[in-house]
Amino acid sequence: MSDSPGFEPAWWLPGPHAQTLWPVLCRRRPRPPLRRERLELPDGDVLELDWTDGEGGPVVLIVHGLEGSSNSHYARGLLAAVAGRGWRGAVMHFRGCGGQPNRLARSYCAGDTADIAHVVGELNRREPATPLAVVGYSLGGNALLKWLGETPVDPPLCAAVAVSVPFLLDAAARRLGRGFSRFYQYFLIGELKRSYRAKFRRRPDGPVALDRLSALRDFYAFDDRVTAPLHGYAGVADYYARASCRPWLGRIRIPTLILQARDDPFIAPDALPDPAELSPCVRLELSRAGGHVGFVAGPWPWRAEYWLERRIAAFLEARWQGTGERG
């Protein structure tokens, strides 16, 4: 574990909430051309991959956060950075996040590692000699780290990066129920309900009737009544305990970078792992500021710099060079 001396937060974005909200509300998002691939899954369901242009070079697979997509600010930024270096980028949409409902009743959750494993396996099958890395954000970062820790054999990756990870889901749910962080909870629960209504309006197998959905006002209630039963958990406590990535960090066996801010308004400080819990392959860089998937630097608002993209690209480039591949 180490501090991140390379990140200096923008003076004009004081505090975690300004750092968190600026790139969501104010950033002019890059628009790299994307092509869509629908990928069939072993259980008969489907998910979508959005690819940048290019037919050669290393591949960076992006796993988005809760209710995210290839349009999320962090995904667009990293896709543009990847394309600018001559690499290929792909966003793996969790089930139902690609713009249309998925086929099965289930959707996705923070412990959803099987789909990451399937997509990584498929990409490796297509191009076994191509360097591959995975970058996960927030909920996607939790799922990525859990998958890396629980995989009994080394996955076919050169490296992995996880950003703004909850680590312990119960602690994250408690943090999002306090202070201004309740704003993020209100917004995200609203998005989850919108997706649920769109999916179960015409099918009868939803665990909660649509007219009772409004009573679910926080993550504990939503995850207990919706997420847990849809994904095979006994309830919210079982889901939070079994889906959290922190118990798996000591078993990761590929080079992995975790980028985290101490002031993240989604993450309780006591959820951060101790150095002894980390595998020797894991580097946890803690910045004093940065918010949740923020990390905005730069001297002025009209010259904002998005440090995450530089740091991730630098880490991955070192790994490509270590395998004889230069991006």
Image (spheres, grey):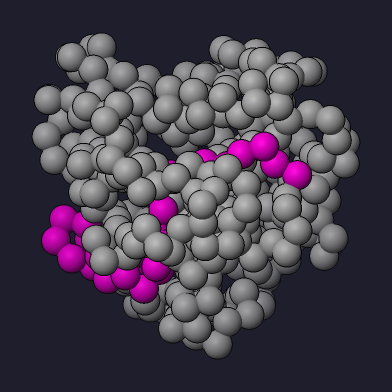
Q: Nearer the viewer, residue 264 or 251?
A: 251
**Residue 53: quarter of image:** top right
Q: Nearer the viewer, residue 157 or 101?
A: 157
Residue at the far bottom in the pictured view = 234
Q: Nearer the viewer, residue 67 or 304?
A: 304
Quick check: is 172 in the magenta stretch? yes
Q: In the rendered structure, which segment of residues is drawn in magenta?
A: 156-182
Quick check: is 12 in the magenta stretch? no
Answer left or right for 271 relative to 158.
left
Horizontal and vertical percent for residue 126? 88, 36
Relative vertical location of residue 49 with respect to residue 240 in this rendering, above or below = above
Answer left or right for 135 relative to 241.
right
Horizontal and vertical percent for residue 236? 45, 81
Residue in view at x 56 percent, y 28 percent:
316
Horizontal and vertical percent for residue 243? 53, 70
Answer left or right for 306 relative to 112.
left
Horizontal and vertical percent for residue 216? 37, 75
Answer left or right for 186 relative to 134.
left
